[in-house]
C-alpha cells in the first residue's frame, strides 16, 4: 500500500512517508510510563530507543503442520543460503533467521531495508516468493508478538473455540491451523471441534472470510456481533456433551460452552509505535482509561461462556496497565472460580517480563494528577463530577491483601527481542467438584446474564475506540494490518438472545443486530442425503458412500437454482438448526466445496470442485478415479489458460482424450527433471472441455506454484505482464488527442471473460 504524507497530528514526514525520529517524542507518555515503572530505570533508555526503530519483517509459514514443514524446508535449503553474504550499498544484509521461540522453527525474521527488497536481485527474488506465497495463504505476514496468544491457548482438534475480536484474522488462522493439526499434504480432516471467528465491525468481519479461504474448514463460522454482549448459542439435545458443568448449564441443556476463548481486545495500540509512529503525537492516558470498560466487559463475557477447565487468553498490543493488569484484576474479582495460570515454561526462548502488581492511573490528559486509590480519587471530586466521571474502581490495583498472582501475566517489550510491545494473560476456569453447588452468579453467568450486584456495564459509546478511516479499513490485509484492533464506529445490539426454531428463522426479513448496518446475508439450508442435487455431485465426482452428505448445506433463497455447495461438521449443523441466524449475524459457515458449471438453465447439471474445497473432499474421492500426471503435463497446464489436449504429453493425453467433459482430479507425484522439481504429491483439479483442459486454480496460486516447482513464473499472466513492461519504455510519449489511450487492461480482462468461469479462488 503506498504511503501517504502525514496530516495534523501525524507529525512531519520525510520524502518516503516516515515520521522523523526527532518527532518521536511525547513527554506525557514518558512521564506516565516512568511512573508505572514498567521497566527498571537502567533499562528505560534501551526501551525508549527501541520504540523509535522500525520493526523487522516477520512472517510465519502457515497451513497444516505437514504442509508448513515442507515449505519451511524450502526456505531453509533454497532461499536462505542464497541470501548469505549479500551486500547492498556497501553493507552486508542479514539473511532471514528463525524466531528461536516459535515451535518447529516455522516463524522467521529479517531486517533488509525495503530498497534492498526492490533492487537487490537475491532479496528481490525472495521478496517475490514471499508475496506470492502470502497471497495464496502459505505464508502469513504477522508481527512476532501477535503469534503468541494462539500458541498459549493450546487448541486441540476437538476443542470448541471462539476468537471474540478476530479481524484481520492472522490469529484466527493460527487457531484454525491448530484444529487441523492432523491434516496431510493432500487432504484435510474434518475436526470435531469448532472455531467461531467474530468481529463487531462488518467490513473487518468480512476480511475474516477472505483469510479463512486460505485454510478452508468445515469447522469454521464467522459472526458479526458485539463481543461484550455475545449471545447464548444453543445446540441440539444430542450435543449436550458440549455443555459445561455448573448447575445452570445442567438445567439449560443445549447451551454451548467453549473450551478455549481468545480475547485479543481493542486497545490504544501504543505497543505498535514501531510500525505506527503517528501514535507518538496523539498518545494520551485517556485512551486507555476510555477503553478499560469495553475491554473488561469483553473479558467478563468470555468468562461466562467458558466450560469448566477451559482456558482464556486475554491480550492487547498496549503497554498500559489500565488496559492490561487492571482489566484482568477487575475480571478475576467479578467472576468467580478463575485463576491466572503460570505459562513461564511455555515458548522457551521467548524473553518476557512478569505482570505488574501496582500501577497508578492518571486522571488527566497531561499525566499531572494521579491518586493512589479509587476512593482518594472520588474524594477529590465535587458531587457533580462524581456523577460524570468515567473512571472506575477496576482501573486501580486490587485492594491490599488480595493476591491475584498478576505476576503470571506476560509483558513483552521492544528492546528485549526486537519486537513490538505486547501483553498476554492466560486464565483458567477451575473444575468444580461434582457435589459443589453453583452460586447465583455462576447460574447467571452461564446464561449470559449479569449477576445481581455486579457492575452495570457502561454503554459502549462511552468507551473511546481507536479510529480508522473507511479507506484504511478497505485496504487492510493480513500483511499490512498486523493484528491491531481498531473500531471505527459505535455498535449497538439487542441483548435479547432467545433463539427461534429452525423453521421460523427462514421467515421475514433479516434483522439488524450489531456490527453496523442491516444484516442481509441469506440463510443456510441443509440438504437431505437423498436430495437429487447431492446425488448428482456425488456421482459426477465419484465420492464414496461415507461422504458426510447429511452435513451438506446451501445458501440461496428458496426456489432459486443451487449454485454452490458447502460442507459443515456436526456441531456446525447443530448450531444452524437451533439458532436464529440473524441474531448470530452468521456471515459464513463451513467451507465451499462445489459450484454449478454451465448455463443457469442447462438441463445437464454439472458441478465442479473448488480448489479450496478439494482438501476436504479428498478423503472421499475414489482413488481409482484420480489421474496421474507428470512434470511435463504440469508445465503445459501452467503455461496456458486453455492448452489444447493435442499439446499435452502423450502419456497424459491418452488418459484424458476419450473421457467425457467434466471435472477431474490429477495427482502429480514427486519428480525431479531438468527445469523443475516436484517435492511431494500435488493434487490439483482440472476441467476438460471438447478440445482443451484448464488447471482450475486462481492465477496468483498458479504463479506461486510455478515459482516453487520451476523456479520461474511460467503463467500467461506473468508473460503478458512482462511483455507489457518490455514495451513500456518505447511507448513513453505524450498522447495526442486523436491517439487511443491505453486503459491498462491486462490479464484481468482475460480472466473475467465467459470462458474463465471455471477459474476459482484458491
Image: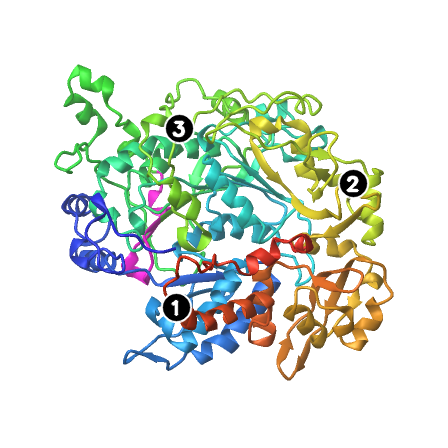
Alpha-carbon distance for marks 3 and 2? Answer: 60 Å
Alpha-carbon distance for marks 1 and 2? Answer: 48 Å
Q: Left or right of 718: which side holds 681?
A: right
Residue 668 picture location, percent across and down = 72, 70
Element at label 2: loop
Identify the residue at the far right of this view.
Answer: 658
The nearer-to-camera label among 3 and 2 is: 2
The nearer-to-camera label among 3 and 1 is: 1
Q: Label 2 crowding class (10 Å Cα cut-off): few <14, some 14-19, many 20+?
A: few
Element at label 3: helix
Magenta residues (range): 404-422
User: Which image quarter: residue 632?
Assistant: bottom right
Residue 505 picture location, percent across and down = 66, 24
Note whether residue 762 is visible: no
Residue 716 picture location, percent across and down = 60, 67
Position of the N terminus, as image quadrant, is: bottom left
Specify whether residue 552 is painted magenta: no
Name the residue at 65% across, 43% down: 590
The residue tagged 2 is 601
Residue 737 picture location, percent across and down = 40, 57
The residue tagged 1 is 732
Q: Left or right of 654: which side holds 332?
A: left
Identify the residue at the far left of this view.
Answer: 368
- Which label is found at residue 334? 3
| Residue 180 versus residue 380 in the image, above or below | below
Q: Label 1 crowding class (10 Å Cα cut-off): few <14, some 14-19, many 20+?
A: few
| Residue 312 versus residue 230 in the image, above or below | below
Position of the C terminus, as image quadrant, is: bottom right
Name the residue at 39% across, 74% down: 95
Mark before the other along the chain sequence, 1 or 2: 2
| Residue 24 versus residue 308 in the image, above or below | below
Alpha-carbon distance for marks 3 and 1? Answer: 69 Å
Amino acid at each position: 500500500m503506498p504511503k501517504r504524507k502525514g496530516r495534523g497530528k501525524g507529525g512531519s514526514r520525510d520524502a518516503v512517508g516516515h515520521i522523523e525520529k526527532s518527532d518521536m517524542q511525547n513527554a506525557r507518555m514518558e512521564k506516565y510510563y516512568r511512573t508505572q515503572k514498567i521497566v527498571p530505570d537502567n533499562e528505560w533508555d534501551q526501551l525508549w530507543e527501541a520504540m523509535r526503530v522500525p520493526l523487522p519483517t516477520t512472517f510465519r509459514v502457515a497451513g497444516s503442520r505437514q504442509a508448513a514443514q515442507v515449505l519451511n524446508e524450502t526456505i531453509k535449503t533454497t532461499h536462505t543460503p542464497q541470501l548469505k553474504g549479500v551486500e547492498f550499498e556497501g553493507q552486508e544484509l542479514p539473511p532471514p533467521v528463525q524466531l528461536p521461540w516459535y515451535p518447529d522453527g516455522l516463524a522467521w525474521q529479517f531486517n533488509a531495508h525495503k530498497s534492498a527488497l526492490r533492487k537487490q536481485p537475491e532479496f528481490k527474488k525472495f521478496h517475490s516468493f514471499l508475496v506470492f506465497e502470502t497471497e495464496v495463504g502459505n505464508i502469513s505476514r504477522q508481527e512476532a508478538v501477535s503469534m503468541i496468544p494462539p500458541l498459549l491457548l493450546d487448541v486441540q482438534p476437538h476443542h470448541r473455540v471462539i476468537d471474540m475480536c478476530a479481524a484481520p484474522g492472522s490469529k484466527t488462522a493460527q487457531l484454525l491451523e491448530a484444529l487441523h493439526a492432523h491434516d496431510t499434504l493432500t487432504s484435510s480432516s474434518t475436526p470435531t471441534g469448532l472455531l467461531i471467528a467474530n468481529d463487531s465491525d462488518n467490513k473487518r468481519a468480512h476480511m475474516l472470510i477472505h483469510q479463512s479461504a486460505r485454510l478452508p474448514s468445515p469447522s469454521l463460522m464467522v459472526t458479526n456481533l458485539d463481543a461484550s454482549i455475545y449471545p447464548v448459542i444453543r445446540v441440539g439435545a444430542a450435543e449436550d456433551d458440549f455443555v459445561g458443568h455448573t448447575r445452570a448449564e445442567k438445567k439449560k441443556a443445549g447451551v454451548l460452552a467453549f473450551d478455549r476463548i481468545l480475547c485479543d481486545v481493542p486497545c490504544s495500540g501504543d505497543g505498535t509505535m514501531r510500525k505506527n509512529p503517528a501514535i507518538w503525537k496523539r498518545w494520551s492516558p485517556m485512551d486507555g482509561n476510555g477503553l478499560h470498560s469495553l475491554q473488561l466487559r469483553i473479558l467478563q463475557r468470555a468468562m461466562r461462556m467458558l466450560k469448566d477447565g477451559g482456558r482464556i487468553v486475554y491480550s492487547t498490543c498496549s503497554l498500559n496497565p489500565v488496559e492490561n493488569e487492571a482489566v484482568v484484576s477487575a475480571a478475576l474479582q467479578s467472576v468467580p472460580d478463575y485463576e491466572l495460570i503460570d505459562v513461564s515454561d511455555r515458548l522457551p526462548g521467548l524473553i518476557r517480563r512478569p505482570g505488574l502488581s501496582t500501577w497508578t492511573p492518571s486522571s488527566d490528559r497531561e499525566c499531572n494528577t494521579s491518586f493512589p486509590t479509587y476512593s482518594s480519587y472520588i474524594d477529590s471530586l465535587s458531587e457533580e463530577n462524581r456523577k460524570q466521571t468515567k473512571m472506575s474502581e477496576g482501573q486501580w490495583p486490587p485492594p491490599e491483601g488480595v493476591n491475584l498472582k498478576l505476576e503470571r501475566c506476560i509483558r513483552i517489550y521492544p528492546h528485549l527481542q526486537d519486537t513490538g510491545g505486547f501483553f498476554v494473560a492466560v486464565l483458567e476456569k477451575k473444575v468444580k467438584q461434582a457435589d459443589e453447588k453453583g452460586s447465583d452468579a455462576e447460574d447467571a453467568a452461564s446464561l449470559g446474564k449479569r449477576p445481581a450486584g455486579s457492575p452495570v456495564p457502561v454503554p459502549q459509546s462511552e468507551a473511546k475506540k481507536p479510529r480508522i478511516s473507511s479507506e484504511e479499513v478497505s485496504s487492510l490485509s493480513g500483511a499490512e494490518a498486523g493484528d491491531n484492533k481498531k473500531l471505527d464506529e459505535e455498535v449497538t445490539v439487542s441483548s435479547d438472545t432467545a433463539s427461534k426454531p429452525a423453521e421460523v428463522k427462514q421467515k421475514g426479513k433479516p434483522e439488524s443486530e450489531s456490527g453496523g448496518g442491516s444484516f442481509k446475508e441469506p440463510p443456510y439450508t441443509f440438504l437431505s442425503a437423498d436430495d437429487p442435487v447431492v446425488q448428482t455431485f456425488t456421482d459426477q465426482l465419484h465420492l464414496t458412500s461415507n461422504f458426510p452428505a447429511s452435513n451438506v448445506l446451501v445458501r440461496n433463497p428458496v426456489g432459486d437454482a443451487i449454485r454452490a455447495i458447502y460442507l459443515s461438521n456436526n456441531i456446525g449443523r447443530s448450531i444452524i438448526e437451533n439458532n436464529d441466524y440473524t441474531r448470530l449475524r452468521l456471515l459464513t459457515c463451513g467451507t465451499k466445496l462445489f459450484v454449478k458449471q454451465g448455463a443457469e438453465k442447462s438441463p445437464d447439471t454439472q458441478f465442479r470442485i473448488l480448489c479450496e474445497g478439494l482438501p476436504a473432499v479428498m478423503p472421499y474421492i475414489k482413488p481409482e478415479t484420480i489421474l496421474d500426471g507428470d512434470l511435463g503435463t504440469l508445465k503445459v497446464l501452467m503455461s496456458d489458460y486453455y492448452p489444447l489436449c493435442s499439446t499435452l504429453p502423450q502419456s497424459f493425453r491418452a488418459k484424458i482424450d476419450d473421457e467425457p467433459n467434466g471435472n477431474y482430479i490429477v495427482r502429480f507425484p514427486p519428480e525431479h527433471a531438468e527445469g523443475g522439481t516436484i517435492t511431494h504429491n500435488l493434487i490439483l483439479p482440472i476441467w476438460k472441455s471438447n478440445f482443451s483442459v484448464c488447471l482450475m486454480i486462481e492465477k496468483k496460486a498458479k504463479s506461486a506454484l510455478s515459482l516453487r516447482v520451476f523456479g520461474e513464473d511460467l503463467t500467461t499472466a506473468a508473460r503478458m505482464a512482462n511483455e507489457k513492461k518490455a514495451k513500456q519504455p518505447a511507448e513513453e510519449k505524450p498522447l495526442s488527442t486523436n491517439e487511443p489511450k491505453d486503459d491498462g487492461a491486462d490479464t484481468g480482462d482475460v480472466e473475467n471473460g465467459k470462458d474463465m468461469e471455471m477459474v476459482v479462488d484458491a
